[in-house]
Amino acid sequence: MRKLDRRSFIKTLGAGAATLCWPLLSFADDKSPGKSRPNVLFIAIDDLRPELGCYGSKHIKSPHIDAFARRGIAFDRAYCQTPVCGPSRSSLLTGIRPDKRTCNIWDADKFAPNAVTLPQAFRQAGYHTISNSKIFHDWEQAAKRSWSETPTGHDNHADFFDPASKNFVKGPMHGPFFEGPDVPDETYVDGQTCAKSLKDLRRLAKMDKPFFLGVGFIRPHLPFYAPKKYWDMYSREDIAIAENRFKPKNAPDSLKVHPEIQWYHDRGIKYNSLEFHTTARHGYYACVSYVDALVGRLLATLDELKLRDNTIVVIWGDHGWHLGEHNFWGKANLLHNATHAPLIISAPGFQGNIRTDRIVELVDIYPTLCELAGMKLPGHLEGTSMAPLMENPKRQWKKAAFTRHGNGFTVTTRDYTYTEYGKDAQRMLYDRKKDPSENENVAEAEEYKETVDQLSKLLDGQI
Ligand SMILES: [Ca+2]
């Protein structure tokens, strides 16, 4: 058999799965008038890992997202295609996987300059499309063709409002890594994004065509800035820190921590000290609860306007995050915590309060939304519509997800995370069934030789 490159293989894999499911689906009439199509509320939460009440985390206060999950389907095994904000979004929003040429490209214009983007496809289908704050990371040309109105940017996400924070400035863009002043929600950019989105919803509800409203929340992305009341939802002494504050045993040199948190001032707290771990977790959790409250307002307004029954709602994170596991803070690596993302979808006509443990990828969101809205799928898409899985969450589905970062290629299966790094052939295998925290790389262990061989072939598209 000719050895396909990874990208061709993955495309083939996706097409195969789609063919398998196609006859079971019912499509809306593609020529139906625009207003008969469902609206889309597309909520991106930056750097949110699947550590929420609805994902089984009892220590996190996320009541609004949890309530939303009870009305939709939660995907327990959703994976990004690259664990960095801009490239992940470029892939998701164009429906194209990162290849060697594009894997670290932040700018959707350079990633796939001619691709019909997800919002563009909806715009072409008669939707009014709006982007508030961070949907694309960089988007000048993509924005022109994707959105019906000029998008609001996300440049002021690091502004600080605690007067004390001016004493902890590390650079022109970087103040302290956390603050929690007693200010209204609208002081920070996410509160403003929410307020504008609520106004937009009221305006869109009166339009004679359906809408695609993209709402991008910046938090819990660094810096951990949230109003005091969200910090107060947690007691510092109750915050449990990561137990595995060490690099995985036998990890290759290619596995590196991303330094992002150290770009910000540490406020005198020693990096990776116990106090640092506790404080940083507290800040992340406060930001999650802040954004959760804003999500609650969006959904309450959707209900008030009686739009929920005709609106697809998607909540997604662009990748995972390390909260001190392995003494890592951030993304940009190929361990499970960095590639595993939250994804919850509710759609008219689909049962709520269900979840699936089948493997899906963020590149699947584009075809899914097109199908749920009864639109034709653009031919360039490399993901697979999850609509059949939403109908039957236990059906047979993808056996693996694929992620790239730099020269690293990762395949994630139900039980394993396997990575190969470039020409120097460094590799990592984590047996997540035995070692869910990924504390020991067993790629070179004799007992895993056969597993490595199989996963390597899977990565190369040979099986
Ligand atoms: Ca991000």
Image (spheres, rainbow, N blue to C red):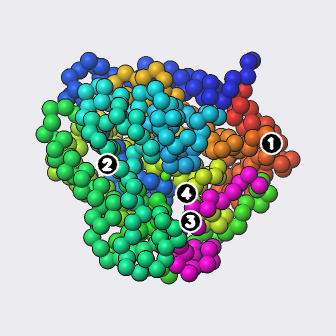
Q: Determine which of the numbered discs, if any, sits on residue 80 in the image.
A: none
Query: How far apart are the alpha carbons under marks 3 and 4?
Result: 17 Å
Residue kind at label 2, given as amino acid type: Thr
- Mark sitting on residue 425: 1
Q: Nearer the viewer, residue 200 or 356?
A: 200
Disc 3 residue type (three-letter): Trp
Name the disc covering residue 152, or none.
2
Q: Is residue 139 above or below residue 53?
A: above
**First in residue order: circle 2 vs circle 3:** 2
- Discs 4/2, front: 2
Q: CA distance from mark 1 to mark 3?
A: 31 Å
Which part of the image, by quadrant, shows the C terminus?
top right
Bin the neighbour count of mark 4 within 10 Å (Cα to Cα): few under 14, some 14-19, many 20 and up.
many
Q: Amino acid at mark 1?
A: Ala
Is there a contact, CB below 8 Å, between mark 1 and mark 2?
Answer: no
Q: Dot 3 lies on which element?
A: helix
Q: Secondary structure at mark 4?
A: loop
Residue 91 part of the magenta segment: no
Mark sitting on residue 263: 3
Q: Badge 2, how many Cα within 10 Å: few under 14, some, many 20+?
A: some
Magenta region, residue range: 253-282
- In the foreground, 278 or 28: 278
C-alpha span from label 1 to label 4: 25 Å
Say which residue label 4 marks: 321
Q: CA distance from mark 2 to mark 3?
A: 25 Å
C-alpha separation, residue under disc 1 versus residue under disc 2: 43 Å
Is 386 displayed left or right of 295 in the figure?
Answer: right
Q: Residue at x 79, y 37 (%)?
A: 453
Placement of 182 over or under 140, stated as above or below: below
Q: Is the C-beta of the residue carrying label 4 under 8 Å from the nearest atom of ligand 1?
A: no
